[in-house]
Amino acid sequence: MLSSESCMLASQESLMSKTMRYEHDNTSQSKNAINVAKGHITRSVSHKINMHSMCDQSLLNTASVASLSHNTMNVDGHIRDGKNYDNDDSSNYYVDSVVDEDDTKCNKEQSKLSSVDESSNACNTAIQIVPIDSDIFQRNFTPEEHFMINLCHVCDEANAPLDLVDKIVGVVRDAQCNGLNMQSNIIRSCEYFLKHLNDHFNTPLPETVHANIEDKDGNEHVFSMIWHNFLLQAMDLIHDHEIWGNVNNFTGTVPMDDPYNCFSHGRKDNKVDEVVDGFWYKQTVQECAQIANGERFVVLGLICYCDKTGTDVYQRNSLEPFSFTFCLFNRECRYKTSAWRTLGYIPDYDNILTTANSTSKGGFIAKSRSCRNFHSLLEVLFNPLIDSQGQKSPIYANVRFGDKVALCRVFFPVAYVMGDGLSSDKMCGRFLGYSNVSRISRVCNASYRDADNPECDCQRISMYYLQRKSNKALKLFGLKEFCANDTIPHCNTIKKLQRNVKEELSRMSHHMHNSAFRKVWFGRNLNGITSATPTDLMHAFCHGVLVYVIKIILAPLNNHEQS
């Protein structure tokens, strides 16, 4: 005879025998919880199966005593009336056995359990067939619980971190406090909302323009590119109240007690930390004061950035964005993307024309074709900038510093253009190389032989001087028409003049091209772009000087000493 404890265990196992199909996910406990809540629930039936094998046998006999001779169940409870009901959730039943405790049977020894009939009579005292849709097995989730379950499931499928759920819940709670209406038509898809949000901002839209570049045969080829109107972009940045309303963005550059006095901008201890502390800004302010002729003015020097970036995984279609910000913003503010505006995008024309085509027409003309195409595209971007720098025609704007606003005449001189070494050399028209070139720097005339001489007495080179040399070469090689006041050379002397101008440009390591910066106003920078491209410290120092110094120090040492 079975003890009441054994019968109770048998009844409990028969109650847990019906299971739902579930594929275990052992990656994390949180994912299991989400899947269980979504309806994938599992109850194990196999634990302690070896300990209670006799109770399983007694359970089968119990079914026959209860007039269920043809309605037999397997261990999983999926077979009834000889049919398989694995996928029939509406016909699933659990067997709930209620066993009365018998104190007299609890005192029997375990060896008297050999009689199967006695054990059956003890276990089948009461059997109830309970449908699976009974209230006992229902889990009634509240709408709030359903919301959290679905939210966790969506974030989990997107492989998002779990703390994203907490952030979303925080956003929803804040929105409810502010009167969120989930029935609003605005709450739709992300694409719909972005289109709706665009109506609230008067953001300048990009435009498509065309530029002429040289093709493989030296003929003009029309090229399309994207650019923004400079004045609209500048005004959009000036009217950004989040930047200009925060006085911390002008700490160290503009004193808040007298922000509209450009002569008071910068440090007072003669140390240079920002652009407004340097000699260029002080001299440019004096020049703008003469132009303003007594009007209130503000000098918004342009800090520009130009560097190539990829747009796809294989870097096949790269772009070179040209962006700008104002020198009155301190360094911490310039680290923010909201403090920058884009002037346009220079496409990878060399990739489109292919290298073979761009050099198919050999000689001195083809060598400089890539540089000429780059400056042709860049000049199209600068056309609206040249006419809107404020020195030729006055430009007015309401300029804000913290809680102060005043109508001022604004000036936009170019302070400098940032970029890596390759991009800066290309903007200056210098040969893209550092070996077998006559001039190793785009700023001065230091030669390759003077590279190891720290006391070399070099001279700065002006962009306008180089442009005059390029104009002469362009006319002699037929890439530019002679002006009315030019002396047209005789056909017998033109070959000699071509060789001479070619040698002059080679000594200067300078490409034959029209510089896109020749009409840009640089304030009191009289050398133009050649003195407005600062050194890229990451490549020149971190990946240059430091690497060479370490190699020089370690070169005399053997492998054991180096380790």
Image: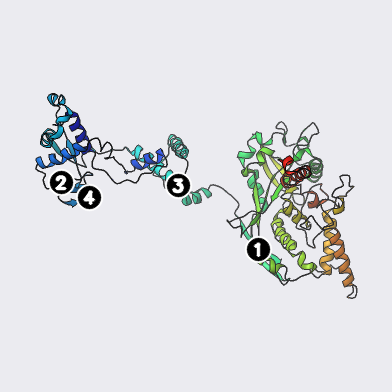
Label 4: which secondary element = loop
Q: Earlier in the sequence, mark 4 or mark 1?
A: 4
Question: In terms of depth relative to the viewer, which is nearer, 327 or 169?
Answer: 169
Pick whichever of labels 1 and 3 is earlier in the sequence. Answer: 3
Residue that sits furthest to the front in the current view = 111
Q: Nearer the viewer, mark 2 or mark 1?
A: 2
- Identified at 33% across, 39% down, the residue is 143
Q: Cα distance, mark 4 to mark 3?
A: 32 Å
Residue tagged by mark 3?
158
Q: Earlier in the sequence, mark 2 or mark 1?
A: 2
Q: Earlier in the sequence, mark 2 or mark 4?
A: 2
Residue topped by disc 2: 72
Residue 169 position in % (x across, y down): 44, 37
At mark 3, the secondary structure is loop
**Closer to the observer: label 2 or label 4?**
2
Residue 355 location (% of width, % of height): 69, 66
Q: Residues within 10 Å of mark 1 (few under 14, many from 20)?
A: some
Task: Say whether residue 332 is visible.
Answer: yes
Residue 379, percent across and down? 72, 59
What residue type is disc 4 on? Asp
**Would you name the residue on which mark 4 appears?**
88
For marks 4 and 1, give the CA distance. Answer: 63 Å
